Image (tube, coloured by chain):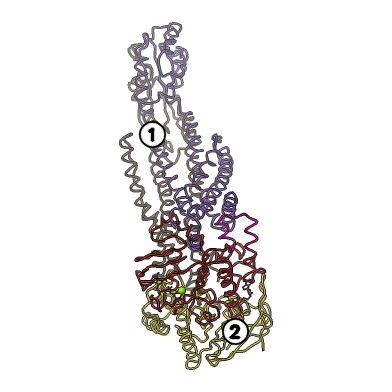
Chain colours: A purple, B red, C brown, D yellow
């Protein structure tokens, strides 16, 4: 039994070596698929990081009554922490408000009027889990009920647009991911199917000599798994190489670096193995019927 | 033991064999003779379950081919040694590996496989061609590799389809001697299908004649 | 000669039909590749449209001297049209400025002060060809030299970030496009190579019977081109189908529609034909050497 | 006209043929005989430029194989009709299409092709098998398709490797008659390689004997 298994494994290796050229095709197909997949994984991982840069868009501006002094307003400000769904807050004193006014309108309100009419305020950032248009609305309403707050402003429009793009990205990514996965399995099984097709006489002969289904199938499955593993190793190399090239380009042009997502090798290795196995067993299934 | 009982197989696009009846006992040497297209290969295919009868039954070494599950076909075939008319050597394996294949299918020990394979190579006079691929062998040499592959596992039954078609007189005689030896001394059942009546006269064996799909007697 | 050509074409068709299963693999490989490509084309086409929605980010805020009346400021405002690189301008009267102030700071400046201290201003949009950080800088400088203008504000930071993302998209798209194209040619030629590999005995026999190289090659090339054409037709169908599905999803969730880019069918058809031709001639080249 | 001048070809992994000299004129019928592995197929392969000599020259119908560009090989082969020892039928074409193939390669008219192909099918007695695929034919029937494909274009030279190995006595005789007719009445040069000395006695023809790669005389 062990002798037979050893024979079948060595058959798988031999077959891989003997049909180097077609096998290379199969391996590079897996590499290509996994490189695309790993690239998507990379981009998603970095996209997530890039969107965090835009988090300032999830900002609510709070205005206190102008009659409140900075100190009084700061006491009200501390009540904000009780509101659910807030990640951070920043107090804006009357003086900061004046300098913001200057920045926005190009005029020093204190010089013009001799006094500072602007109210104190606060900038509130919405926590990650609450960044939907509906939740932000609720949070703004909650803040508005705090005593001493006259007005609450937030860029609802921008938030809604952002949400739109994120939704598109998530749904698009989901669809593309499923298409790519099906495509990969299809490609691998097709390549292995063609390899088997080229060996159909051999397979017939094996059956005529009394070989069982599994005796005939096993070397092909082993061959497929080996191809998957080799293909995924090449894909890991390709992605790390691509990462270096892209980072070189990116640093040169935009001073921005992509990071390497965690578990890349594990992710691709597992996918390669599964691809090889599913692909070859699908490919084998069609042709080997005693 | 091989028994065909009222066996009929008609090809969808072509003739076939009709109402065949015979019994062949253990250790018998049988010549299955008939002209080209008579149905010799068809009868052998029925025996190794490559074809199933449309009517009647085929019983080989205790298996009734039309009644068994397809999972059992490998078990039947492991009791047989087959020589194919078109050799059916695996092109990507050398002579040694082609001949060793049935032993791997039986799951024998490595050492055992080596011994038996070299013995079979010796039987057909191809020891010095062991590591040549089929395309590096002459027609007659390929045929002898096919014969070695059939006898290497010392099977209960040998079904040889035109085993001397590509062999010269000397090699033909040696092959016939080998198969006769296996029948007489080893108790193997040996069926040789051939169109060549001259080889029949060279060995004492039973004659089964077929023409246009029907047995003559 | 014509009889021979007719024979070879019919051979290509027959070969395609005879090897339906492997050919189907080849065809679907082309379909898949072109679907990915067409999808990218679709996304690029729509991405361009989506960025145009963000054009408000290429905006320069202009402030006139507070002592100027609305009428005087409007005269200065008309000088803006002479500045190069501007696509549109909008005049902001002192009253509009006050209402913007109210929106931003939650306080009616006129009620508080009894008078409107805010200056008139203008919103300037930068023309398409000038939307780089450097150009915007220049335009802002040009505007600042106009008499009566006290200050010019623009979101240089945001523009720079946007530029960054667009650069990433363009370079990333370029790299992905090249990888995908090479991958597609590789996949097609590999599939056809395997088909030819399965027919190597037939090819040898044809040569032994006196067939020339081109007699043997032509049916494979014809087969490849047919596969390319069929594959691209399927890809066009797949993309139009995907578009419908995505639009259904998008409309449902975000009230946004993707449009069909122009020349999609022509683009994919040409690519499919070229893919089939390049792939099959590459695939054929390896195996057919008399 | 075929001439081998001091031709030697030694296989990298195996024997070969050594210092072969002979000339065969137009219209001759030649039997190339020798035991299995003697080098018969090797000599034929040298004639149809599947192998090139390492020493000496091979001249066939005006082409000297070792001096011609590889582009000319198809032109040489179009003057030849080949019967292969292993038939080499295309598995995905029926008998008719297999036989018509050399005519398509020559670029003949459709009507012409039809006529000649049916004539060749008739010559080998397989009119009723025209639309059968090789796997639907018996061994002997496949061999006859191979013979029909060699003669269909009425070639200057016919090189037949073991053309009766799978044929019964009756069919063998008919095939020999056909080839003899082509040599005598048609002026074709016919070379039949065989291990079977018995068929040599049946027709008047020149005998070239080879053993272990060397000519006997
Ligand atoms: N798959 C098939 N479909 C249709 N007809 C077939 C098929 N296989 C064989 N035949 C026909 O059945 C008849 C018997 O074939 P078989 O191969 O048994 O002959 P045979 O006696 O072995 O002849 P040979 O000596 O030429 O090998 C032949 O006429 C052949 O054409
Ligand atoms: N490609 C090859 N590589 C090595 N040796 C070869 C090759 N082809 C043939 N041989 C050897 O050359 C010798 C002559 O082979 P050839 O095929 O010419 O014999 P033959 O006379 O046709 O025999 P048969 O009657 O068995 O067909 C044989 O011993 C064979 O093993
Ligand atoms: Mg037969
Ligand atoms: Mg030979």
Kindly state the secondary structure of the residue where label 1 is placed.
Answer: helix
Give me the residue at 42% from left, 85% from top. Answer: D123
Contact, CB < 8 Å: mark 1 with mark 2?
no
Give me the residue at 60% from left, 89% from top. Answer: D207
The reply, left or right, for residue A202 in relation to residue C65 is right
Is disc 1's CB within 8 Å of ligand 1?
no
Residue D82 visible within the image: no
Residue A99 picture location, percent across and down: 47, 17
Provide the residue span drawn in magenta.
B98-117
- Provide the residue designation for mark 2: D33
- Of C203 and A15, the residue lying toward us: A15
Please report, as a chain letter, where disc 2 is located: D
Q: Are marks 1 and 2 on the same chain?
A: no
- Provide the residue designation for mark 1: A167
Graded by Cα atoms within 10 Å as few (under 14), some (14 to 19) or many (20 or more), the crowding at tag 1 reads some
Residue C68 picture location, percent across and down: 38, 22
Ligand 4's quadrant is bottom right
Magenta span includes A3? no
Magenta span includes B109? yes
Res B147 quadrant in image: bottom right
- Of C129 and A91, the residue lying toward us: A91
Residue A64 visible within the image: yes
- Of D75 and C260, the residue lying toward us: D75
Quadrant of the drawing holding the C terminus of chain B: bottom left
Q: Does residue B105 lie above or below A269 as drawn?
A: below
Task: Tell how many labels.
Answer: 2
Q: Does residue A220 lie above or below B81 as drawn?
A: above
């Amino acid at each position: 039994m062990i002798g037979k298994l050893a024979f079948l494994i060595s058959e798988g290796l031999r077959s891989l070596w003997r049909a180097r050229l077609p096998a290379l095709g199969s391996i590079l197909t897996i590499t290509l698929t996994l490189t695309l997949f790993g690239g998507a994984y990379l981009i998603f991982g970095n996209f997530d990081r890039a969107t965090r840069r835009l988090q300032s868009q999830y900002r609510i501006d709070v205005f206190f009554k102008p009659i409140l002094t900075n100190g009084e307003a700061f006491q009200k400000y501390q009540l904000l922490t009780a509101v659910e769904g807030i990640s951070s807050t920043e107090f804006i004193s009357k003086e900061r408000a004046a300098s913001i006014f200057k920045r926005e309108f190009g005029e020093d309100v204190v010089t013009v009027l001799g006094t500072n009419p602007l109210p104190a305020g606060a900038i509130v950032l919405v926590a990650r889990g609450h960044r939907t248009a509906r939740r932000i609305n609720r949070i703004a309403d909650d803040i508005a009920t705090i005593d001493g707050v006259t007005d609450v402003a937030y860029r609802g429009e921008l938030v809604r647009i952002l949400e739109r793009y994120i939704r598109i990205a998530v749904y698009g990514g989901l669809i593309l991911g499923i298409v790519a996965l099906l495509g990969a399995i299809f490609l691998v099984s097709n390549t292995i199917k063609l390899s088997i097709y080229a060996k159909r006489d051999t397979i017939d002969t094996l059956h005529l000599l009394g070989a069982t289904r599994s005796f005939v199938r096993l070397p092909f499955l082993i061959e497929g798994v080996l191809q998957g593993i080799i293909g995924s190793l090449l894909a890991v190399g390709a992605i790390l190489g691509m990462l270096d090239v892209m980072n070189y380009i990116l640093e040169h042009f935009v001073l921005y670096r992509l990071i390497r997502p965690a578990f890349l090798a594990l992710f691709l290795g597992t996918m390669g193995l599964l691809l090889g196995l599913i692909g070859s067993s699908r490919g084998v299934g069609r042709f080997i019927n005693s | 033991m091989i028994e065909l009982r009222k066996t009929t197989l008609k090809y969808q696009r072509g003739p076939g064999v009709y109402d065949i009846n015979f019994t062949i006992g253990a250790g018998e040497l049988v010549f299955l003779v008939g002209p080209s297209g008579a149905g010799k290969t068809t009868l052998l295919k029925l025996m190794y379950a490559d074809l199933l009868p449309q009517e009647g039954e085929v019983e080989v070494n205790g298996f009734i081919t039309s009644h068994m599950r397809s999972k059992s076909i490998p078990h039947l075939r492991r009791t047989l040694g087959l020589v194919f008319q078109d050799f059916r050597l695996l092109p990507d394996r050398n002579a040694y590996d082609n001949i060793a294949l049935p032993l791997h299918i039986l799951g024998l020990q490595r050492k055992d496989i080596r011994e038996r394979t070299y013995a079979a190579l010796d039987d057909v006079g191809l020891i010095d061609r062991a590591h040549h691929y089929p395309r590096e062998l002459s027609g007659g040499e390929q045929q002898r590799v096919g014969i070695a592959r059939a006898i290497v596992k010392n099977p209960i039954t040998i079904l040889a389809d035109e085993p001397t078609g590509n062999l010269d007189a000397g090699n033909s005689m040696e092959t016939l001697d080998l198969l006769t030896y296996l029948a007489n001394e080893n108790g193997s059942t040996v069926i040789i299908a051939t169109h060549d009546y001259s080889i029949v006269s060279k060995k004492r064996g039973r004659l089964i004649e077929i023409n246009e799909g029907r047995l003559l007697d």
